[in-house]
């Protein structure tokens, strides 16, 4: 749920149906198992152009009423799964960080850090970078488990945990943090597409030089493994790589819990999805693309893929 001041609704690609994602590694090499995704990526949109010639309608329209053309689901292709960096703003201050399942922590130069030494560093004011993860394990921050790599960064303003993980794993967690995981699967899929589109916008326009998004409702709620369930993973997997596109650009898919909140927070910007409304439409038998079409009228669905594939 986005209650803060949102960004612009759409991000237009520089040419044709493509937009470049330039990912600069500000944190150093770190401890990432997917280092090639830290290089240049190209997001190419396999869009249904028939639905891409009118601006997304405002959120004041009634989503319960049929809205004309339904955005087509693009055919499966090999999609990109880039790394995204999430600042765990909700977990400040860092009281305790530990590893499990074979994961470990290392300094920026590669030297290992023992648990006791790590806690001493976090309790102090020394600047630096520690990266934790690897070996299929996970990192626990203030009692909450996270997948991927955890960068612990202090640039002189206190320690901040930055979780680096694949976009699809992130989407699965956001779906469970933003919607009850027992909700209708089509509503969860609609949420997955909206969350992926929103995240990709912030990969193109990061909030900070060290991270793309925060983990609070100012961006998208994200709770690591806590909010990742079988149903949310399924929602992410079955919509893998699908985003909302408009005229070759990427739509920042705003949403909120109810239509009233959506209208109040985002109505002056344009299209925005009601999460409870999505659940109601799913219970009536609408598929996820039909739900998205009701809220983001005029947008099409596209898949992202690596350049050259």
Image (cartoon, grey):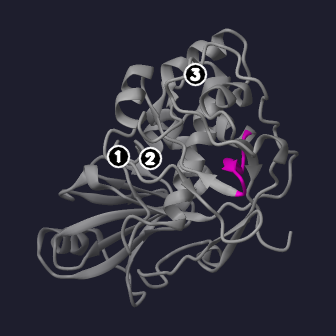
Q: Quadrant of residue 187?
A: top right
37 left or right, relative to 109:
right
Nearest the eye: 184 or 42: 42
Which callout, 3 or 1, points at the residue further toward the start of the chain? 1
Q: Which residues are magenta?
A: 239-248
Nearest the eye: 4 or 40: 4
Q: Which mark is residue 278?
A: 3
Within-10-Å neighbours for mark 2: few <14, some 14–19, many 20+:
many
Location of the C terminus (image quadrant): bottom right
Residue 54 located within the stretch drawn in magenta: no
Residue indicated by mark 2: 224
Residue at 31%, 44% (x, y): give it.
Answer: 4
Residue 247 located within the stretch drawn in magenta: yes
Dot 1: what SS? strand
Q: Quadrant of residue 62?
A: top right
Residue 183 visible here = no
* Residue 207 percent across, percent down from the top left: 38, 64
């Amino acid at each position: 749920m986005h209650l803060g001041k949102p960004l612009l609704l759409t991000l237009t690609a520089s040419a044709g149906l493509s937009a470049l994602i330039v990912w600069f590694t500000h944190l150093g090499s770190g401890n990432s198992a997917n280092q090639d995704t830290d290089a240049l990526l190209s997001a190419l949109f396999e869009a249904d152009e028939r639905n891409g010639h009118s601006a997304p309608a405002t959120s004041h329209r009634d989503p319960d009423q049929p809205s004309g053309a339904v955005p087509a689901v693009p055919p499966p292709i090999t999609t990109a799964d880039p790394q995204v960096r999430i600042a765990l703003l909700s977990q400040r201050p860092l009281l305790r960080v530990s590893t499990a399942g074979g994961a470990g922590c290392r300094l920026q130069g590669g030297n290992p850090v023992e648990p006791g030494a790590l806690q001493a560093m976090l309790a102090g004011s020394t600047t630096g970078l520690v990266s934790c993860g690897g070996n299929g394990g996970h990192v626990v921050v203030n009692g909450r488990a996270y997948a991927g790599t955890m960068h612990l960064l202090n640039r002189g303003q206190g320690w901040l945990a930055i979780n680096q993980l694949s976009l699809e794993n992130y989407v699965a967690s956001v779906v469970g943090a933003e919607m009850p995981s027992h909700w209708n699967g089509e509503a969860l899929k609609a949420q997955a597409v909206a969350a992926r589109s929103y995240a990709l916008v912030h990969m193109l326009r990061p909030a900070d030089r060290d991270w793309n998004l925060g983990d609070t409702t100012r961006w998208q709620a994200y709770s690591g493994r806590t909010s990742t369930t079988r149903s949310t993973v399924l929602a992410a997997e079955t919509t893998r790589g699908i985003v909302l596109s408009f005229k070759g650009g990427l739509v920042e898919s705003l949403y909120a819990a109810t239509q009233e909140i959506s209208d109040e927070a985002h109505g002056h910007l344009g299209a925005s999805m009601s999460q409870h409304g999505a659940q109601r439409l799913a219970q009536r038998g609408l598929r996820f693309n039909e739900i998205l079409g009701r809220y983001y009228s005029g947008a099409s669905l596209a898949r992202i893929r690596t350049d050259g594939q």
